[in-house]
């Protein structure tokens, strides 16, 4: 890497890297740059660089940790790392023993998702206990300042939930029971937003569709299509486009949004799992859609 000495020098290289197509190489390049900046800049300038580059503290910290982990370099050379920095960071968090086992078992590959890695890790640590229903008992109580801001509390809870899930545990905070209805309403609101998106994105397709196809699938309006059961939704669009290949070329994002919308509208845990599983299969079958699926998970399918 060229010799860099100022915040502006680092920022120019960072911006150039950000403009590149997302890949494991680009993640490692940014991470190496953050590491070099940490070593060469003052703390004040290092913070200034982060702010000017538009990174939050948590994301910046993850890039730094990735940049400091030399174990990732051989995996990158063998093209085993995914393009998601969050999944690469999860790989970084593995112990040497866990990383060796995951690599030996073929768990580390360029399309591995963070969810799949977490499930494997839970099984590796706890064997047959992973995923089983077990008797639960309170283990840890956390005390904090009474004036903790809502934003800080939210970050704390999110981080604790992630750590607890790795160990086969879950977190329960005061107010969780009373917040169920609030979560449900928030999920329904997200579903409405996705419905509006689908109505807008499919309007042209609906307007140009032949009436015989509408009759075949029992659809009288665009609203009927957007809110139809999944076989009707996909069947109609496949028929309009003439083939599955054309469907996936033209309506892959609509399919992803439809699954996310149905996820938001349903209450059953099993149903929500099935919608996530369906999109995971899409990401595995069509690697170019993996990033879109991850974005949809993060933006719409957190319950």
Image (cartoon, rainbow, N blue to C red):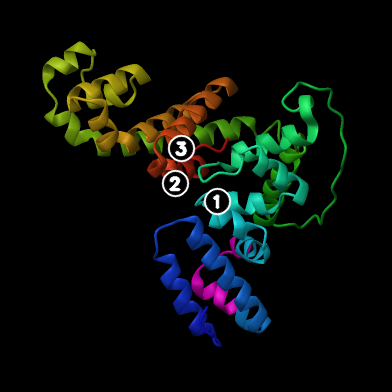
Depth order, front residue of 230/124: 124
Q: Nearer the viewer, residue 57 or 33?
A: 33
Disc 2 is placed on an element classified as: helix
Q: Which portion, as a residue range, is magenta?
A: 47-60
Q: Main secondary structure of the magenta part?
A: helix
Confirm whether residue 218 shows in the render.
yes
Whether residue 16 is situated above or below residue 207 in the rendered picture: below
Left or right placement of residue 1 versus residue 47 in this view: left
Question: Where does label 3 land, which residue?
Answer: 190
Tell whether position 4 is magenta.
Answer: no
Q: Nearer the viewer, mark 2 or mark 1?
A: 1
**Height in image: 239 above or below 55?**
above
Q: Position of residue 281 (x, y in %)?
A: 46, 30
Labels 2 and 1: the sequence-earlier one? 1
Asked whether the beta carbons under mark 2 and mark 3 sit within 8 Å of each other, the answer is no
What is the x, y in percent for residue 101? 71, 41
Q: Residues within 10 Å of mark 3 (few under 14, many from 20)?
A: many
Disc 1: which residue: 81
Instruction: Measure the C-alpha gap from mark 3 to mark 1.
Output: 32 Å
Circle 2 is placed at which residue position?
291
> Percent position (x, y) of residue 263?
48, 28
- Residue 5 location (% of width, % of height): 56, 88
Tell me what residue is drawn at x 44 percent, y 56 percent. Answer: 22
Q: Nearer the viewer, residue 127 or 265?
A: 127
Figure quadrant of residue 66: bottom right
Secondary structure at numbered mark 1: loop
- Quadrant where the image shows the C terminus: top right
Image quadrant assignment for residue 216: top left
Q: Nearer the viewer, mark 3 or mark 1?
A: 1
Q: Earlier in the sequence, mark 3 or mark 1?
A: 1
């Amino acid at each position: 890497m060229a010799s860099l000495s100022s915040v502006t020098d680092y920022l120019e290289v960072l911006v150039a890297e950000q403009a590149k197509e997302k890949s494991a190489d680009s993640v490692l390049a940014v991470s190496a740059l953050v590491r070099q900046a940490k070593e060469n800049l003052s703390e004040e300038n290092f913070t200034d660089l982060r702010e000017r580059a538009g990174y939050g503290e948590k994301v910046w910290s993850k890039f730094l940790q990735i940049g400091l982990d030399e174990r990732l370099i051989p995996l990158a050379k063998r093209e085993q790392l995914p393009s998601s920095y969050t999944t690469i960071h999860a790989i970084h968090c593995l112990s040497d023993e866990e990383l060796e086992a995951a690599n030996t078992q073929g768990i580390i590959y360029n399309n591995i998702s963070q969810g799949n890695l977490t499930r494997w890790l839970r099984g590796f640590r706890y064997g047959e206990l992973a995923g089983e229903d077990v008797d639960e008992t309170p283990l840890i109580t956390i005390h904090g300042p009474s004036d903790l801001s809502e934003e800080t509390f939210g970050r704390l809870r999110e981080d604790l939930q992630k750590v607890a899930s790795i160990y086969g545990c879950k977190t329960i905070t005061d107010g969780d029971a009373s917040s169920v209805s609030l979560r449900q309403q928030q999920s329904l609101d997200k579903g409405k937003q996705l419905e509006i998106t689908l109505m807008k994105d499919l309007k042209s397709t609906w307007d140009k569709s032949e009436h015989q196809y509408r009759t075949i699938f029992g659809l009288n309006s665009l609203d009927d299509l957007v809110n139809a059961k999944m076989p009707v939704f996909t069947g109609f669009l496949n028929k309009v486009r003439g083939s599955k290949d054309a469907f996936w070329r033209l309506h892959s994002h609509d399919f992803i949004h439809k699954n996310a919308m149905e996820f938001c509208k349903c209450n059953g845990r099993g149903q929500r799992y099935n919608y996530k599983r369906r999109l995971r299969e899409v990401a595995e079958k069509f690697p170019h859609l993996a990033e879109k699926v991850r974005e949809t998970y993060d933006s719409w399918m957190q319950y």
